[in-house]
Image (spheres, rainbow, N blue to C red):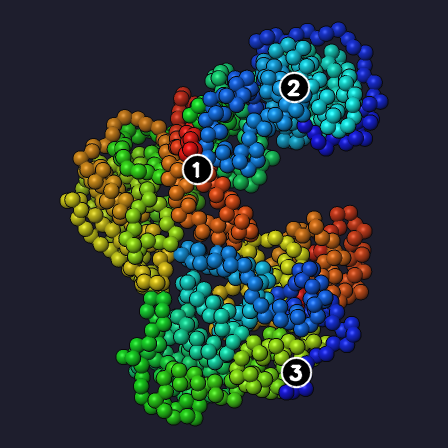
């Protein structure tokens, strides 16, 4: 609704005379895709192929019912009124039940396009029939007339374009109706373009783009929303952050960091997004089109085992494919000549830590590119519990031979010794090195000297780095307690064979607990770094906690459904609020 | 009491916007338009009393306690900047900065945010009290002991750094001691060090032998050495010079020094009571004291932010102050910041200009050039007013007019 619709605009509109009514337009072909009605200039396209069940089901829709049971939704409804009340207000404004009306108006499709060059949006909806479109627009116009106190201003069309009736809502919007088709746009030429497409049964609209057409045809028919983002073209209108992300995605170094698949998504020519609203939660799929990637760095390029599963209370875990052996081996082809010196330096420095062995040819090839990351909250000794607690993180990889573990242990010990020298030069206490054996497992660890009572326990006490080798599993972690736990869990487990997908699992409720533990520090940080008032900072952190408490889990996978398609799949699982 | 320190009795109309702004600027960090109006209405005495109060919101104080464990100097700088800009304790924050400049200690060497915070709290807590306690406190302050190598000052291997600076910079000034006093005072301070983050006196490292300091003989320890330094006639004059340069003008006269040193001694070294006299004096409000020195970056940013009501994150302000040459907790040397014209050398001026233009842009939606001119330069120099009038005729003139006022040389005289 346009609350800012100026009265003067209405006054002008009232004196405009509509053109003479013409013959009714030919109806649209029933099976015609709504994307064919959207002009191809839209760089952002959003369609609601599966919105109808949501509109028909209303608040009883399984997804909405589940979402409303979450702590976040309950808090929002408590603060801003219930959804029932909001719907009642909408019905009262419209003078008719809003959701059924919207369902009828969009029964055969609804799509939204955006052209960033002209900052112009365009809404196209196809109703069940011409009567439904007319009924819907009449109700909306009547509501606008009541709201602005200009009865009759929109009762009849202001102009007639060919076989379409057209209304002007001030300078802000043009509304057109042609049979069952309703169009709302900012610019007249965009609305005319839609009408021209509608009049041509063979028009392709957005489907004239082959990339889009391929993804459009492959989309899940029951997706509530489907979107297309022409990233390459949007880059010119985006901020520096978007450009930097795309640069990272396109660069081999970025793919080395993010992984080949995720890098490909960042650097893709276009993205196709699909959102399904299930009772357990939303599922979002992001498919990359025209995604350049380094094949040799992609998951499965090197046949390798994966670390065995672990089964603790994880805050988060991930399975990633990072083949740094291949990365180093291919450096001459992946990187320009000026970057080679940095690689040479890295390899030379690596040799210092790995007893003279070549990092690229003698160390990394003996480690699996599959790496399992695990994040857990750990128990600290009371005198060592940091005032700001961070989760411990460990990486697990598979060694060709357990004897390879010695080189890694020696590298960690050398690193800690060097850091200790640096700290000593500053007159500060460094990490002390410890060797221990737990249940027959030898473990190398390091820790800072115990803090003096009453002098505070700093962030650095989250760090008690440790490393061990269990069977052929190499475990390196930020805290010895986690490394010890993982060693026990992996004891006797062989590595896994077979291919896998890169994946990430998060436990949002546990993360909310971590946030709650550090709430005072987070609030203070917001006050000082962002300039928020104390109450506002507190509300922001509480809001974030509520979001996390509203999810039982988050699953993210990076898939390759076909060799040319990279897909990111994200599924938050909704949590039900405690009664 | 010296005539220069005689209480100012403003004639009718003399307690005006420029006078009130001068007091709020020098004894604090400027004022919001509302605070300036309030000061005009309340009068000099009530305004002065308000400057001594501490109304800092407890949640702001608590914010740094929650973050000390993060070991972030940047957040510590932001916290102090937030206290300064909040204006809850104007004079206390002003004196904390004055003492930070005198007892200049840098995180660059100390490398411990908790120690830097501890010293800052000491300066804040003791800054308006007995100077003798402040000096004794700073001599045992762990950050100072790290900064001036007190930890390595041991019997037979004296480290003279702290002794030299306490005589030269902190308490007496050149010409009032000789090299032997430095060496003997260093022996007296031997054995003072740190264990963890706490002060510790290690008798086994203390040189208990006889010493001669400033003409006095005895088996002096650190406490006794400080008492001898405080008893030297130059000490009160040294402190008076620090106060006069901060609150009145650079290069105070002999008469002013004598006058304020006498006031300090008469008040039993009470800095707060001394400042009540100084800030109420004819000397403080004299024309030669107004706009008599170049604003330090923190003063400049705080005064502009407060006058404009700009809500800039404290971390951003602290970063800008650093770029302008005043990184809190990181003075460039034991002598503190050079100040004066050094604040506006080419590199610093560009950073200052950019920071103020950005502030102007942020303030523009709610303020115009005339309001800002009235608030930050209540003297409203005619040439500036004419220029703002010219700018006001341009379309979208507010950011340009505000930036023009903030970058005018007059605004940078504090």
Same chain for labels 2 and 3? Say yes or no: no
- Residue A410 sits above or below residue B47 on the image: above
Have a look at marks 1 and 3 and say if they share a chain. no
- Rendered location of residue A257, percent (x, y): 40, 39
Front residue of A121/A560: it is A121
The residue drawn where x is 56% and y is 66% is B54
Q: What residue occupies the far front of the structure in this picture?
A: A579
* Residue extending farthest right: A15
CA gap, disc 2 and disc 3: 80 Å
Residue A105 vs residue A243, the one in the foreground: A105
Quadrant of image for the N terminus of chain A: top right
**Left or right: A526, with A18 as reference point:** left
Mark in the foreground, 2 or 3? 2
Query: In the displayed structure, would residue A174 be above or below residue B145?
Result: above
Query: Which quarter of the rendered picture does the C terminus of chain A lie within?
Result: top left
> Which residue is found at the position 30% from the left and 51% from the top?
A380
Q: CA distance from mark 2 to mark 1?
A: 37 Å
The residue that disc 1 covers is A548
Which residue is under mark 2?
A96
The numbered dot on residue A348 is none
What secondary structure is marked by label 1?
A: helix
- Disc 2 sits on a residue from what chain? A
Mark 1–mark 3 Cα distance, whole angstroms, equals: 63 Å
Mark 3 sits on what residue? B5
Whether label 1 touches label 3, CB < 8 Å: no
């Amino acid at each position: 609704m346009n609350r800012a619709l100026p009265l003067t605009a209405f006054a002008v509109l009232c004196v405009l005379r509509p053109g003479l009514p013409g013959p009714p337009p030919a109806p649209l072909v029933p099976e015609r895709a709504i994307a064919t009605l959207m002009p191809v200039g839209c760089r952002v396209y959003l369609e609601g192929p599966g919105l109808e069940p949501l509109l028909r089901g209303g608040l009883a829709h399984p997804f909405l019912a589940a979402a409303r049971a979450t702590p976040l939704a309950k808090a929002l409804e408590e603060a801003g009124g219930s959804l029932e009340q909001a719907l009642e207000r909408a019905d009262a404004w419209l003078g008719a039940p809003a959701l059924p009306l919207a369902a009828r108006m969009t029964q055969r499709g609804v799509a939204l396009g955006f052209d960033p060059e002209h900052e112009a949006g365009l809404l196209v909806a196809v109703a069940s029939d011409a009567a439904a479109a007319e009924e819907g627009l009449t109700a909306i116009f009547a509501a606008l007339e009541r709201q602005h106190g200009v009865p009759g201003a929109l009762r009849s069309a202001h102009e007639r374009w060919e076989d379409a009736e057209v209304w002007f809502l001030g300078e802000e919007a043009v509304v057109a109706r042609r049979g069952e088709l309703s169009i709302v746009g900012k610019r007249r030429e965009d609305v005319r373009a839609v009408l021209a497409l509608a009049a041509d049964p063979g028009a392709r609209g957005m489907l004239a783009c082959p990339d889009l057409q391929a993804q459009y045809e492959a989309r899940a028919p029951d997706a509530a929303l489907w979107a297309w983002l022409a990233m390459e073209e949007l880059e010119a209108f985006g901020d520096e952050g978007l450009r930097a992300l795309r640069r990272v995605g396109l660069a081999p170094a970025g793919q080395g960091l993010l992984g080949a698949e995720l890098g490909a998504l960042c650097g893709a020519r276009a993205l196709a997004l699909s959102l399904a609203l299930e009772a357990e939660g939303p599922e979002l799929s992001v498919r990359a089109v025209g995604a350049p990637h380094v094949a040799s760095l992609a998951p499965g390029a090197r046949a390798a085992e994966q670390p065995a599963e672990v089964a603790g209370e994880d805050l988060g875990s991930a399975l990633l494919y990072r083949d740094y052996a291949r990365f180093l081996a291919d450096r001459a082809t992946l990187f320009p000549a000026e970057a080679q010196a940095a690689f040479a330096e890295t390899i030379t420095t690596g040799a210092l830590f790995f007893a003279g062995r070549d990092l690229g040819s003698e160390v990394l090839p003996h480690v699996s590119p599959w790496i399992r990351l695990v994040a857990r909250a750990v128990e600290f000794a009371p005198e060592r519990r940091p005032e700001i607690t961070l989760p411990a993180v460990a990486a697990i990889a598979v060694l060709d031979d357990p004897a390879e573990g010695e080189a890694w242990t020696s590298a960690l010990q050398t690193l800690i010794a060097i850091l200790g020298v640096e700290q000593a030069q500053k007159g500060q206490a460094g990490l002390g090195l410890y060797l221990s054996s737990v249940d027959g497992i030898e473990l190398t660890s390091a820790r800072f000297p115990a803090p003096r009572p009453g002098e505070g326990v700093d962030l650095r006490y989250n760090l008690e780095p440790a490393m061990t080798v269990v069977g052929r599993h190499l475990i390196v972690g930020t805290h010895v307690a986690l490394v010890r736990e993982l060693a026990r869990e992996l004891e006797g487990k062989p590595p896994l064979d077979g291919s896998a997908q890169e994946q990430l699992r998060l436990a949002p409720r546990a993360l909310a607990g971590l946030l709650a533990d550090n709430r005072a520090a987070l609030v203070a940080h917001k006050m000082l770094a962002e300039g928020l008032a104390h109450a506002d900072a507190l509300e922001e952190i509480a809001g974030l906690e509520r979001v996390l408490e509203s999810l039982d889990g988050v699953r993210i996978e990076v898939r390759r459904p076909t060799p040319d398609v990279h897909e990111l799949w994200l599924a938050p699982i909704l949590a039900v609020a405690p009664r | 009491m010296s005539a220069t320190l005689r209480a100012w009795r403003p004639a009718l109309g003399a307690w005006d916007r420029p006078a009130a702004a001068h007091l709020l600027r020098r004894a604090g960090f400027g004022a919001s338009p509302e605070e300036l109006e309030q000061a005009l209405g309340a009068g000099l005495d009530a305004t002065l009393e308000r400057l001594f109060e501490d109304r800092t919101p407890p949640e702001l104080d608590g914010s740094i306690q929650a973050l000390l464990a993060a070991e972030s100097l940047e957040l510590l700088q932001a916290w102090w900047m937030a206290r300064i800009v909040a204006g809850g304790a104007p004079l206390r924050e002003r004196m904390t900065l004055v003492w930070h400049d005198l007892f200049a200690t840098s995180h660059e060497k100390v490398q411990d945010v908790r120690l830097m915070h501890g010293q800052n709290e000491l300066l804040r807590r003791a800054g308006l009290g007995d100077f003798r306690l402040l000096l004794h406190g700073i001599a045992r302050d762990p950050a100072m002991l790290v900064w001036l190598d007190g930890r390595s000052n041991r019997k037979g291997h004296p480290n003279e750094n702290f002794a030299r600076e306490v005589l030269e910079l902190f308490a007496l000034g050149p010409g009032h001691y000789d090299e032997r006093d430095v060496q003997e005072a260093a022996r007296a301070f031997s054995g003072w060090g740190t264990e963890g983050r706490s002060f510790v006196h290690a008798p086994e490292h203390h040189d208990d032998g006889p010493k001669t300091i400033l003409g006095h003989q005895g088996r002096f320890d650190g406490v006794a050495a400080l008492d001898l330094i405080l008893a030297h006639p130059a000490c009160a004059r040294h402190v008076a010079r620090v106060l006069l340069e901060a609150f009145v003008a650079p290069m105070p006269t002999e008469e002013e020094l004598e006058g304020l040193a006498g006031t300090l001694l008469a008040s039993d070294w009470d800095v707060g009571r001394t400042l009540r006299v100084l800030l109420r004096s004819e000397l403080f409000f004299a024309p030669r004291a107004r706009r008599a020195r170049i604003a330090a970056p923190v003063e400049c940013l705080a005064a502009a932010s407060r006058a404009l009501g700009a809500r800039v994150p404290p971390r951003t302000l602290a970063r800008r102050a650093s770029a302008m040459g005043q990184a809190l907790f990181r003075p460039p040397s034991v002598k503190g910041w050079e100040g004066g014209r050094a604040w506006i050398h080419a590199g610093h001026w560009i950073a200052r200009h950019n920071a103020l233009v950005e502030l102007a842009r942020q303030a523009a939606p709610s303020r115009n050039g005339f309001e800002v001119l009235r608030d930050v330069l209540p003297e409203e120099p005619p040439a500036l007013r004419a220029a703002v009038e010219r700018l006001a005729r341009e379309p979208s003139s507010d950011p340009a007019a505000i930036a023009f006022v903030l970058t005018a040389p007059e605004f940078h005289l504090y």
